[in-house]
Amino acid sequence: MHRILLIARRDYLATVRTKAFLVGLVVAPLLFGGGLLGVALLKAKPDIADRRVAIVDRSGTAAASIIQAAGEKSAREAVDKTTGRQVEPRYLFETVPADDRDANAQRLALSERVRGHQLYAFLEIVPRAGDPALRVSCYSEASGIDDARRWFDGPVTTGIQRARLVKLGVDPSLVGDLLTPVAVERLSLVTRDEKTGAIRKAHKKGELEGFAVPFGLMMLLGMIVLVGSSPMLPAVTEDKAQRIVEMLLGLATPWELMTGKVLAAVGISLTSSAFYVIGGTLALAGLGMIGMVPFALLPWFYVYLVADVVMLCAFAAALGSACSSPQDAQSLAVVLVAPVVIPYFLITPAMTQPNGALVTAASLFPPFAPMMMLVRQAMPGGVPAWQPWVALAGILAWTMLAVWAAARIFRVGILMQGKPPKIADMVRWAIRG
């Protein structure tokens, strides 16, 4: 044990004292969550400049209703009711008489106005016999994911419906009541307290509660696991190629050497996680959002973190011991990162159906269980009380098996030279030792 701790201490200090580690603490969140941060910053300072929109109404009956509906929506959403500040752009409409002689020339002229930034976009209403609109087209420079074009969907639909009702003879004063939308309140499922048996009432779901917390925990766990375990593979390969391992084996057994390196990686991961968890908690507290911190899940987070790092570092040490060059290690890196990367492809079903068959099975399958079970536990509805414990038992059993097999591979492969790694050879070393 003394030799194991000496090796772990040496590797830990050699890593945390480097500038690369300190820089990585800042750069890693930007690489993993930079896109989300950029979106948040853009939303924090939105473009609220007025947007001019032209309407070409070839029916002659729908433009006024659409402009009225758009004005009502803009009045509801453009200004924050609490602060009174403008938070969304206002849409200013102008009606352009339809040129039925050369519709294409008119579209070209309006497109040139959009390119010249005189207009943000223009709408064209194409009627059919007896109906104000057969088709409504929106022309703009924005891409297909532009939110502004989706903004028109509601006012256009409401305006066309109003025009149709008025055409059918409905009193215009009643149209507003008929078309008033009904908001659907999103609530969590009703649950029963396992200890008292009392029925817990459903609570309102929020965007941050339903997405940001589970996704943030998953991103944090995956980032720390990758940052903590991925350097193990090239480090072991490099030590082996430079014959450093041969000198170390004169002082410690292969098991002690591998165990020390794994413990060092666990210490590095715990250091990184403490930095992010404490920093994130203080940041949310400063923003008055301390309620978003999932304190009840932090013990599970650290259990999953330690198990995942131990498992992947043991695999990395075993793979690195079988490689004779950094090029061989690069070809096997995909095997190491697969248990972390694959759960990201399941994030959508995990968010939409956290208790679905696919997501439940993935959260109970040991290689994917740490990340998938953490996401499900962070969802508003939670998971059945027995599932995290079953997943934890599987994770511990899988980790012990992985460490045992990796130690046997490491013991044989660490002294092998000049032979490219083969999966069949590593399986044989794990079985026979």
Image: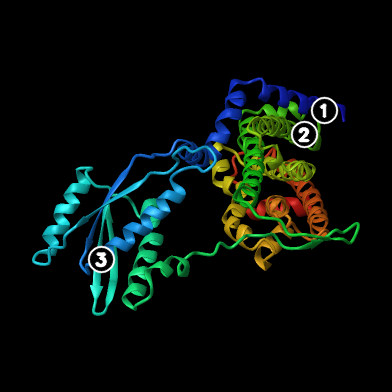
How packed is label 3: few (under 14 Cα within 10 Å), some, or many (20 or more)? many
Residue type at mark 2 is: Leu
Say if 243 sits above or below 116 in the image. above
Is residue 422 in sight in this rendering?
no
Left or right of 101: which side holds 240?
Answer: right
Q: Position of residue 53 (x, y in %)?
A: 27, 51
Label 1: how many Cα within 10 Å (few below 14, some 14–19, many 20+): some
In the image, what residue occupies the spot 58% across and 41% down?
Answer: 329
Among the two numbered marks 2 and 1 on one chain, the one whose residue lies closer to the N terminus: 1
Q: What residue is disc 3 on?
A: 125
Q: Which residue is mark 1?
A: 5
Q: At 62% from the left edge and 51% from the top edge, which residue is drawn?
A: 206
Residue 2 location (% of width, % of height): 87, 26
N-term mark: 3 or 1: 1
In front: label 3 or label 1: 3
Which quarter shows the N terminus? top right
Q: Is residue 101 above or below residue 273?
A: below
Q: Which marked residue is nearer to the observer: mark 3 or mark 2?
A: 3
Q: Are marks 2 and 1 in contact (CB under 8 Å)?
A: yes
Which element is circle 2 on? helix
416 w.r.t. 391: above or below: above
The amino acid at mark 3 is Ile
Q: Nearer the viewer, residue 111 or 72?
A: 72
Nearer to us in this view, 197 or 50: 50
C-alpha span from label 3 to label 2: 68 Å
